[in-house]
Image (cartoon, rainbow, N blue to C red):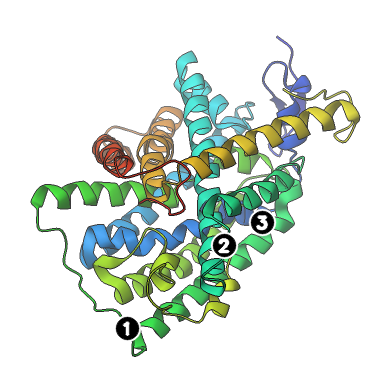
Amino acid sequence: MTVDPIRNEYGSSLRLTSGRENDAGAQFVLESKGQWWHAGYHLTTAIVGPIILTLPYVFRGLGWGLGFFCLTMMGIVTFYAYYLMSLVLEHCEKQGRRHIRFRELASDVLGSDWMFYFVIAVQTAINTGISIASIVLAGECLEITYSSIMPNGTLKLYHFIAMVTVVMIALSQFPSFHSLRHINLVSLLLSLGYTFLIVAACIHAATSKNAPPRDYSLESSQAARVFNAFTSTSIIAAIFGNGILPEIQATLAPPATGKMLKGLFLCYSVIFITFYSAAVSGYYTFGNKSNSNILQSLLPHKGSALAPTWILILSMKSADTKRGIFSKRNLIPRLILRTTYMIFCGLFAAMLPFFGDINSVIGAIGFIPLDFILPMLLYNMAYKPSKSSITYWINISIIVIFTGVGLLGTFSSIRKLILDAKEFKIFNSNVVG
């Protein structure tokens, strides 16, 4: 077996997996040069994004009490899960096995070839789904703002989705995760900025003379309330989801010990500020009329705007490692492959803009197994805590609970997607869900 030994902070020879020296992802994309605050930027961008605009809609399906409970518990569980995963990565590194990808970590710790491909499949589905959902949301926000400024304008939703896709194509050309650190810092600041703007817009709407009537009642049908609750829970899982923590930790310059915990504290500080303020202000203002994108509630297609438009405008192996990262041999394939991928995501987003539905399905079948189940399983397998210890049983309890939540969430999310699809036309100008 070909190995690439390096020295780590524990003074031992650290062995990387076979063929890593010819792995473009390892050599280029996941270069290990970052500090803990860079990891914090990456984590925040991976979790906190415009998807928080759907949090009032989540509360619509859960109500005040259950909404706060689920949001808080998901936050606690994901922080715990990500911390455990960082410990497992450090544990493997101490033993001379440094992993830079989730799939390698899962395969090694669980000793299973099929787990390697399971994680690849889930990560691919998550990344594609999130790319599509992000394009839909960004295009929708632009379209809402455009329609408010030019109500008789000729541009449709798919035009703005195409514009966003072009921007995403440009961003996708950054060669490495580390090279995105400054953009992700800007993203962190923007997440705070547009959250404050949305909160201000909701407060303005709630106190204006045209304030919408507020009704916080849930569906009258017991079955509908149950389905909505699990759909909302799946969306929260997608909102908190971060299926690339090992890859983010791989960007840290050694020694990595303790750095991810600092990065997590930075990330979750932003999460606390943005998630609760967006959820509370949006649901307080619109109640059970909250839309899957709160901007649709603030700037409805029919009726007068409930917030100043200007406020909302402010918000929004393909390589050869023996050659340079910007060499023609590596640049052209990267340009073609990433552009093609983003065009596919943009086309899918324009054809089927199911924003809320996409997020709930992604949360149920992607983020719940990857972020709410596997980290606890990996920790129990790697550290082998005593079966009489509280840590062991906390992890087992989380695994069992979220396995059930994931199964029920998958069913309810797909059901909602099918119901919405019956009323949908391809290249619709309005986002569904």
The answer to whether 79 appears left or right of 171 in the picture is: left
Tell me which numbered mark, 1 or 3, is placed earlier along the sequence: 3
The residue lying at 47 percent from left, 56 percent from top is 51
Tell me how far mark 1 sits from mark 2, CA to CA.
Answer: 24 Å
Work out whether residue 374 or residue 148 is closer to the camera in this orientation and state it. 148
Residue found 53% across the figure and 78% down from its top: 309
Relative to 160, does residue 242 appear above or below in the rendering? above
Verify CB contact (< 8 Å) between mark 1 and mark 3.
Answer: no
Give the residue displayed 26% in from the left and 34% down from the top: 407
Label pair 1/2, CB-CB below 8 angstroms: no
Which numbered dot is residue 142? Answer: 2
Specify the label residue 227 is tagged with.
none
Residue 45: x %, y % from top left: 58, 54
Q: Position of residue 409 (x, y in %)?
A: 27, 41
Residue 283 vs residue 88: left or right?
A: left
Q: Nearer the viewer, mark 3 or mark 2?
A: 2
Answer few, some or many: residues within 10 Å of disc 3's Cα (few below 14, many 20 plus, some between 14 and 19).
Answer: many
| SS at mark 1 in the image | loop
Front position in the image: 179 or 412: 412
* Disc sitting over residue 184 in the figure: 3
Q: Which mark is residue 211?
A: 1
The amino acid on which the numbered mark 3 sits, given as a three-letter code, is Asn
| Amino acid at the residue labelled 1 | Ala
Tag in front: 1 or 3: 1
Secondary element type, mark 2: helix
Find residue 24 and report its horizontal and vertical position in percent: 75, 27
Tell me if residue 296 can be seen. Answer: yes
> With respect to residue 154, does 364 lie above or below?
above
Label 3, label 2: how far apart the Cα atoms are: 21 Å
- Mark sitting earlier along the chain (3/2): 2
